[in-house]
Amino acid sequence: MRITITAKHVKVTDKMKEYAEAKLERLERYFNRIHSIQVILNQDGLDHVCEINVHTDTHNHLSAVVHHQEDMHAAVDLCIDKAVRQLGKLKGKLKGHKGADKRKKLVRDVRRLTQRVRKESTYEEAKNE
């Protein structure tokens, strides 16, 4: 996972970069197929703006933007929480819960067919004797 942090109209300290990277590494717990993350920290007047762009191996692109007046750390935290929710939704869509009933039915059908084959083979054996 590649993390890129960019700052616009504001000077970002090393401590802030380390804080953001530590928080961003948590995203792999929620979705392990992340290819790269781009973070853009910006100051627009009094607003501190954090934008996170997540690129995944499944060719999906997620974007989370948060404006916060108080602190850049709070903007980063809120933006990461937003990205976690989006990754959870993406993981749920990729998992596909709708096929579980079909798989259960397929297993039942296969069991019935194998039981029939066994019964037919015993009938044929009895017939040949």
Image (tube, helix red, strand yellow):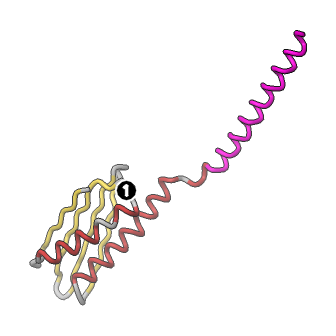
* Residue at the image point whose x is 13% and y is 73% from the top: 8
Does residue 74 sit above or below 21 in this rendering? below
Q: Residue at x 63, y 50 (%)?
A: 100
Between 80 and 111, the residue placed more toward the observer is: 111
Depth order, front residue of 75/15:
15
Q: Is residue 114 magenta?
A: yes
**Residue drawn where x is 15% and y is 68% of the image:** 6
State the image quarter where residue 5 is shown.
Answer: bottom left
Residue stretch rendered in magenta on the structure? 100-129
Position of the C terminus, as image quadrant, is top right
At label 1, the amino acid type is Asn
Q: Considering the whole magenta stretch, tell me its main secondary structure.
A: helix
Question: Is residue 121 found left or right of 129 in the rendered image?
Answer: left
Quadrant of the image occupied by residue 103: top right
| Residue 106 image offset from top left, x and y in percent | 68, 40
Q: Secondary structure at mark 1?
A: loop
Quadrant of the snapshot with the N terminus: bottom left
**Which percent across, then down, holds residue 114?**
74, 30
Which residue is under mark 1? 32
The residue sitting at 87% across, 19% down in the picture is 123
Q: Position of residue 9 (x, y in %)?
A: 11, 77
Taking the view exactly as shown, the residue that stands out farthest to the top is 128
Residue 113 to residue 8: above or below:
above
Quarter of the image for residue 32 reads bottom left
